[in-house]
Amino acid sequence: MRILALNYEYPPLGGGAGNATAYICRELVGLGCEVAVLTSGYRGLPAQDSVDGYELQRVPVLRKRLDQSTPLEMASFVLSAAVPALQLARRFRPDVVHVYFAVPTGPLGVLIKRLVGTPYLLSLRGGDVPGFLPDTLGRLHRLTAPINGLVWREAGAVVANSEGLQQLAQRVAGAHRVHMAPNGVDLKTYHPEPRLDDGVFRALFVGRLVEQKGARYLLEAAARLRTEVDRPIEVVLVGAGPEEPVLRRLASALGLAEAVRFAGWASRSDMPAHYRNADCFVFPSFEEGMSNAVLEAMASGLPIITTDIYGNRDLFTSEGQGFLVPTADAASIAAVLRRLVVEPALRRTVGDRARARAAEFGWQHTAASYLELSRMITRSGAGATAMVR
């Protein structure tokens, strides 16, 4: 098949959804597809590129940072990409368009479908699903409801990246079916390696520094342990975002200024080293579809402490694969950290089980699911009418 992928984020821009786009497109090429990608430009990046056997085109946008994009910057992608998307669709002649995010990318899928006649698959990533983080995103979801509804109705198929997100999306979709294809992980890039023990226990967090990710609870947990364990503890935060000044002040107030390292935003090529240098991975997020960072840490053989939310429940289905704790609960995180610090055998056992579980989530499986849904769209002709039921 010929597949055109649209996403306003693509590495090095953005986070998990951009990485997912890159990995899925790479695997689709490996499955015999011809692929083209349209995404946002950024200073220093070429407008035209060839990556992993597929064509990559970037359009100019109003974007100031690699790690995040404002609503205005997102809107600038849709406006800037409208004509290039139509031109690329007419030249490349895809069988199906893969649209990542209902908002902001979704309107481009509708445009191509109506003017070129090519159906599209809609890939939901979390924040574009009404009901996801209602306290934070509720107002945005209300404002974008007409666009969201149009994009969902016109899609040939809608797919979520976890069972929990699928269930949430299904409540919005009503009679229309929402499919599920889980996120994946690059098992060759992320794998266990022995760490040189320098006497310091390192707890790693990877993600945007925003309130949703809950990094503050890791800092509070580390502060609880300072007088309870003999081994020095270092918290490494890989990522950037508006909460960084707040977290820096919190670290200082907790007496952790020297024990917390703000590593900044990291490229995909830098990430394996961060996992290799850690003793455990802590991800106290309030809501996720399915976290790429958690999967990468699992594949790297790290014991995982993360919150008991639906995206994470999909990953840890058996006892001993990881530790699920309540949201906003530093005491529970501290209790598990304490065990991991003093019980190296437990770290190894849980890390091994996490790696074995991660081995079930190769990107090729995800890409194969997308390919089958794409074939279903073209066989049914659903793209010309409404969403697959």
Image (cartoon, rainbow, N blue to C red):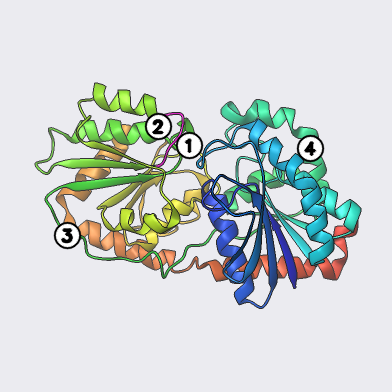
Q: Amino acid type of disc 4?
A: Ile
Which mark, by number, is residue 235?
none
- Picture quarter with the N terminus: bottom right
Marked residue nearer the N-terminal end (4 or 1): 4
Marked residue nearer the N-terminal end (3 or 4): 4
Looking at the rendered image, the disc whose residue lies closer to the viewer, 4 or 1, is: 4
**What's drawn in magenta, residue-wise?**
239-243
**50 relative to 157, above or below:** below
Q: Which residue is mark 2?
A: 328
The alpha-carbon separation of the residues under discs 2 and 3 comes to 32 Å
Looking at the rendered image, the disc whose residue lies closer to the viewer, 1 or 3, is: 3
Q: Which residue is mark 4?
A: 147
Q: Which residue is mark 3?
A: 196
Looking at the rendered image, the disc whose residue lies closer to the viewer, 4 or 2, is: 4
Q: Which residue is mark 1?
A: 286
Q: Is residue 325 left or right of residue 181?
A: left
**334 relative to 363, above or below:** above
Residue at (22%, 31%) from the top-left corner? 223
